Amino acid sequence: MNTDKRLVYMDHAATTATRPEVAEAMLPYMTGHFGNPSSLYDLAKASREALEEARERVAAAIGAEPKQVYFTSGGTESDNWALKGVAFAKKEKGSHIITSVVEHHAISHTCEWLEKQGFSVTYLPVDRFGMVNPADVEAAITPETILITVMMANNEVGTIQPVAEIGAIAKKHGVLFHTDAVQAVGHIPVDVGELNIDLLSLSGHKFHGPKGTGALYIGPGVRLDPLMHGGAQERGRRAGTENVPGIVGLGLAVSLAVADMAENAERLTALRDRLTAGLLAIPHTYLNGHPDKRLPNNVNVVFEFIEGESILLLLNRYGIAASTGSACSSRSLDPSHVLMACGLPHEVVHGSLRLTLGEETTEADVDYVIAAVKEVVQRLRDMSPLTPPELRSQSIGGDKICITRR
Amino acid sequence: MYNEKVMDHFEHPRNQGAIEAADGTGEVGNAQCGDIMKIYLKVEADVITDVKFQTFGCGAAVASSSMATELIKGRTLAEAWELSNKAVAEALEGLPPQKLHCSVLAEEAIHTAINDYRTKHGLEAWEETGSHTH
């Protein structure tokens, strides 16, 4: 196979390239329109207007009012703010939070920190597809419960959670409902009203906006303490001079993403299914996450008998950028908590591969990746002591050493 | 993340494979932790005349296996026993700190294979100590 300079970026769940037109729209707010939106003079007016236009755009993308959108530094800050802000604002009412075991670390590690502060947290299990059962949410609610937080779509396996059902349950019981929609906004339809969402986190760089940008939707009547203390920016709820260029980029990026969303989703779903089918043709390969209720761009599979970091290193030589849940590739050396929660054994989690497609992904890319993955998997299986004889090729590596098995 | 030497051994592993009717084999690690290393030895007159490895694991695990087999090929069993994980990591011109255990695995796999050979030949297994004397 040709392993020249071709680059196939299949890690859109990690981050995306900022669209050139988005980057271009941001530039004037770094140079000419550099005024601080809080200032009085004319120079600041352009910044202020840009801020409010971006707010309208984000609001429109999620079915909210502009005044309900608060800009942050990204998904992690939004998640931290929602959880800590509600927990501390409502601690007289109760100290119980409900979440799931498949949340992003921005949620799960915040929950763990809140536990150290005296709050109690219920971590709901998921089924083998990574799906939370809404009945479990309802059963976990106590008079002490102040917040339910369940992500809209999972970043690893792409499973789309029954957020509407969970939202309805939260509403029925008068409990606030937050959702981490970082992987969802700009990719699948999101309407905070229809879904009964009180708080929603989103992140700009997941839909071709700039990194370091995000927002928290705060629904009507939701009280939460600030995370950032300081000036009176963002209606006094989030201190710090607004990242005007970033916010401009976020606003434009979300508008563009939502405008093309239906068309893109349809195209990506077809590519996703083609990629999935191609990979599942490799023996001892299994799909992670829900077969249908999943993000249009997410493929996550496990290959038995091999390890994910090795897969990524070899795919990198084909110019393919991907991700794995293997412990060996994580800085913490912990295997994916999401795949473990789906019931996968440790040894299988190590062999996981996540490929997340984007709008520039073509059918030719998908076919190239399928062919490359087949070669890589075979090469690593030939090297692995776990591989059963029938899965080994006759020769291995460049040395053409015949494998002899007893 | 890895230096060129590690990548070279990962991408072009030396001595990868199995030896039929090996004189000694050693398998260490477990799939749960994400790495398993198996070493096969061919021994003639106390000298390792051939060595092969099979590894399930990350880039560092594969590179450590490859380098370790290179370092013990043609050596006596006593010399091979002395190969430390540090020597493997140094020969690879360094491993990231969180990957040093991969070189430990290589040392352990070789020790297990040597002792497999020794016990098969009615010899006493050498003991794992800080300073190996035999």
Image (cartoon, rainbow, N blue to C red):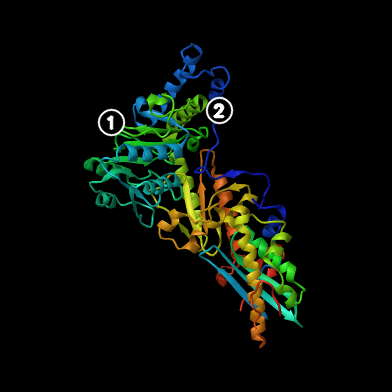
Secondary structure beneath disc 2? helix
Q: Give the amino acid at mark 1.
A: Gly
Q: Earlier in the sequence, mark 2 or mark 1?
A: 2
Q: Which residue is mark 1?
A: A221
Q: What whole-number distance in Å separates the C-alpha atoms at marks 2 and 1?
A: 35 Å
Q: Is residue B112 left or right of residue A129?
A: right
Q: Which chain is indicated by disc 2?
A: A
Residue B46's x, y, as percent?
A: 75, 81
Residue A4's x, y, as percent?
A: 68, 47
- Nearer the observer, A237 or A278: A237
Name the residue located 35 percent from the left edge and 34 percent from the top edge. Answer: A225
Q: Give the amino acid at mark 2.
A: Ala
Q: Which residue is mark 2?
A: A23
Secondary structure beneath disc 1? loop
Label 1 crowd bin: few (<14), some (14–19), many (20+), radius 10 Å: few
Q: Is residue A185 visible?
A: no
Instruction: Judge whether A220 appears above or below A340 on screen.
Output: above
Instruction: Judge whether A19 appears above or below A182 on screen.
Output: above
Q: Is residue B131 visible?
A: yes
- Nearer the observer, A303 or A29: A29
